[in-house]
Image (spheres, rainbow, N blue to C red):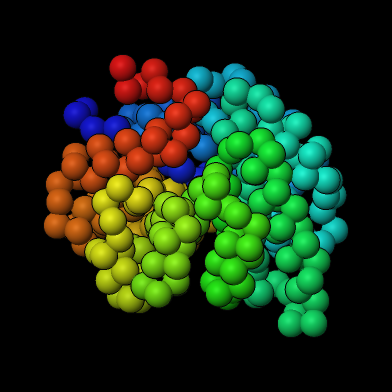
Amino acid sequence: MSFLLVDSHCHLHMLEPDAGHPGSYLRAAQERGVGHFLTVSVDLDGFPELLALAETHDEVSTSVGVHPCGRHLRMESPETIAELADHPKVIAIGETGLDYMCAEKSDREWQHARFRDQVRAARIARKPLIIHTRGAPGDTARILREEGADDVGGIIHCFTEDWGSAKAFLDLGFHISLSGIVTFSNAHALRKVAGKLPADRLLLETDCPYLAPVPYRGRQNEPAFVREVAECLAGVRKVSLETLAEQTTLNFYRLFPNANTSALQ
């Protein structure tokens, strides 16, 4: 197989255990050309499990952070989060950000505060951010700007916004990651944006076990299905799958130079 893909955002610990353990999902993905996996933290209590998984598999990296949809989730100071990130297998802070679909307008300040704290943690740790934004592109970009997030950069994961929003994040030095949503029949506007993104800022993801791409909609998503995202984007951008894979993989390792790169050697 002449190409290598990276799943830049997955949740390996959330995959159904009765369908196989994480190692079986990784092997299935590797058979389809996927060489590295960033399994992403959503809460601090689950972080030790993610770190143990990353320590067990050379091809897996992880992050530490608290998802915006979870006021009940334990939060720590920026300094404590940065201390948790002081491990070679922890390559990012997040996922963090804003999600206005799960917070009333009158109940958003706690999201803002947690988001700001995690940007500060990233700056202390000197590691990129993984950003979740839904229904809040303007405030997300504003807080990133106010907190100096351009100093560390990162990923706007599972991007679904318009070109204006993409441009605001690109201007802050962030990469844009596209998920299986780009393959959906009604995602015409997103595919137009995908066609305009700079080649050196584009990343691929599954966000598994969520958002399975066509033709797997309705099933649990798996890291192996990042290939369908790549195939769709190659068609949208009128390049070969090999070219798309090479560029997005190089983008990932440029953003995360401390990720295991043995698969590239």
Image quadrant holding the C terminus, namely top left
**Quadrant position of residue 141:** bottom right
| 54, above or below 234, in the image | above
Residue 159 is left or right of residue 107, and the answer is: left
**Quadrant position of residue 124:** top right
Residue under the point 15% across and 47% down: 240
Q: Position of residue 89 (x, y in %)?
A: 59, 26
Residue under the point 66% across and 36% down: 125
Residue 246 is left or right of residue 209, and the answer is: left
- Label tally: 0
Q: Position of residue 35 (x, y in %)?
A: 38, 29
User: Visible in this render: residue 21?
Assistant: no
Residue under the point 75% across and 80% down: 104
User: Visible in this render: residue 71?
Assistant: yes
| 97, above or below 247, in the image | below
Q: Position of residue 48 (x, y in %)?
A: 74, 31
Q: Position of residue 128 (x, y in %)?
A: 55, 43
Using the image as rendered, state which of residue 153 and residue 110 is in the foreground. 153
Image quadrant holding the N terminus, namely top left
Residue placed farthest to the bottom in the image?
Answer: 105
